[in-house]
Image: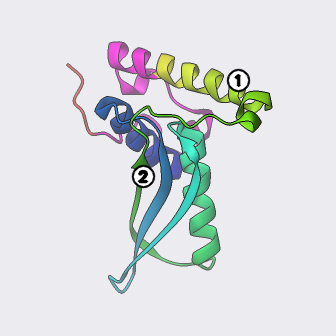
Amino acid sequence: WFYALSESVVARLRAADVGRANTVHIVVRNEHLQDTTCQTKVPPTAICGDVAKTAYELYCRHFPIGTKVRMLGVTVSGFDYHVEQLSLDDALAPQGATYEKKERMENAVQMLRSKYGYASLQRGLVLEDEKLNGLDIRGKKEE
């Protein structure tokens, strides 16, 4: 579910063209209808895997195993609006190239989904769960 929700969040982030986000939030409603929110700062990202991993880590850190969840939400904030602060460390670190590759891959996935429909390309992780397989988390109808 974290990957499915994060894909929707990142797709809206890209559509809004606000750059990368530096904060990941989750909201969890338990069986008693009590909402709990958690958030954490992350390096600026617009990558689904980064958002999903951080959201899952937040959940694992703040909710015990066996917590009954009635509602789960993932959001991001702290947009950079495509303004990037450069430093010497960033210039020397090879991880920037890795981020750019991931970003290009996610852009290609988004283009394929917009052309052929959301269910045309799914993560292997999602395919293992019958409830998530083929689910369009964004709720758009295919024409």
Q: Is residue 37 above or below residue 96?
A: below
Tag 1 residue: 97
Secondary structure under the numbered disc 1 in the rendered image: helix
Q: What span is colored magenta in the figure?
A: 110-138
If the image is split into quadrants, where does the C terminus sit? Answer: top left
Q: Is residue 108 above or below residue 61?
A: above
Mark 1 residue type: Ala
> In the rendered structure, does residue 10 fall within the stretch colored magenta?
no
Question: Mark 2 packing: few (<14 Cα in 10 Å), some, or many (20+)?
Answer: many
The picture places residue 58, in percent across and down from the top left corner, at 58, 66
Secondary structure under the numbered disc 2 in the rendered image: strand
In the depicted view, which residue is nearer to us: 92 or 99? 92
The picture places residue 51, in percent across and down from the top left corner, at 54, 48
The tag earlier along the polypeptide, 2 or 1, is 2
Q: Label 2 vs label 1: CA separation?
A: 23 Å
What residue is rendered at 22% in x and 30% in y? 141
Q: Quadrant of residue 11?
A: top left
Tag 2 residue: 76
Q: Is residue 81 above or below residue 117?
A: below
In the depicted view, which residue is nearer to us: 123 or 7? 7
